[in-house]
Amino acid sequence: MTKTYQSLQFLIYQKVVLIDGRNVISDFTGGVTTPNRSNGLFTTSDEKLQKALEKDIGYGKAYICISKEPVKEEPIKEETPEVVKDEGEIDPIQFKAVKDIVNAQQARDYLAKTFEGVTYGMLKNKLKVLAIAEEYKIEFPDWDM
């Protein structure tokens, strides 16, 4: 079960509890003052931590449990058999062939001018030009690399 605890006074609050001989820190975060004040929250599904927080002297004074949600079990997915490609089968991802590009500089200019968001700074060398071209599914058949 997942439980959410809320600090009663503070936007950010840390509570240290002892579990199995070690200190565990619970961070209550996310508090805001505007537009409406909301104090810090802490959510956990660890049952040992939940019991330790609820047995602590600060429970009910410094923080409280505000919600309990059962753990959602994911439905079992049926495994689908993998499709094995034949040797002669063509990959469905098609690259666009751009002719008349014979070097890295021409490819760099083409990519920077054609695709919004691609800048010359992203295309500093041949490897980066090729990586961006692959990302945009572009190939340059006339370029002898």
Image (cartoon, rainbow, N blue to C red):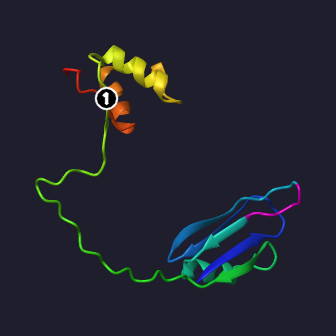
Tell me where residue 16 appears, x and y as whole percent: 64, 67
The one of 108 and 34 positioned closer to us in this rendering: 108
Relative side of 35 to 68, left or right: right
Tell me where residue 137 appears, x and y as whole percent: 35, 38
Does residue 38 belong to the magenta stretch?
yes
The one of 69 and 136 positioned closer to us in this rendering: 136
Q: Quadrant of the N terminus?
A: bottom right
Count of labels in the image: 1
Q: Quadrant of the C terminus?
A: top left
Kindly state the secondary structure of the residue where label 1 is placed: helix
The one of 23 and 34 positioned closer to us in this rendering: 34
Label the magenta part by its dominant secondary structure.
loop
The one of 99 and 43 positioned closer to us in this rendering: 99
Rendered image quadrant of residue 65: bottom right
Type of amino acid at the residue the image marks with label 1: Leu
Relative side of 18 to 87, left or right: right
Q: Is residue 118 above or below residue 39?
A: above
Q: Residue at x 38, y 32 (%)?
A: 132
Tell me where residue 93 appears, x and y as whole percent: 31, 48
Relative side of 93 to 69, left or right: left
- Answer whether residue 38 is visible to the viewer in this image: yes
Residue extent of the magenta highlight: 35-40
Tell me where residue 48 appears, x and y as whole percent: 55, 81
Does residue 53 belong to the magenta stretch?
no
| Residue placed under numbered mark 1 in the picture | 130
Rendered image quadrant of residue 94: top left
Q: Callout 1: 10 Å neighbours few (<14), some, many (20+)?
A: some
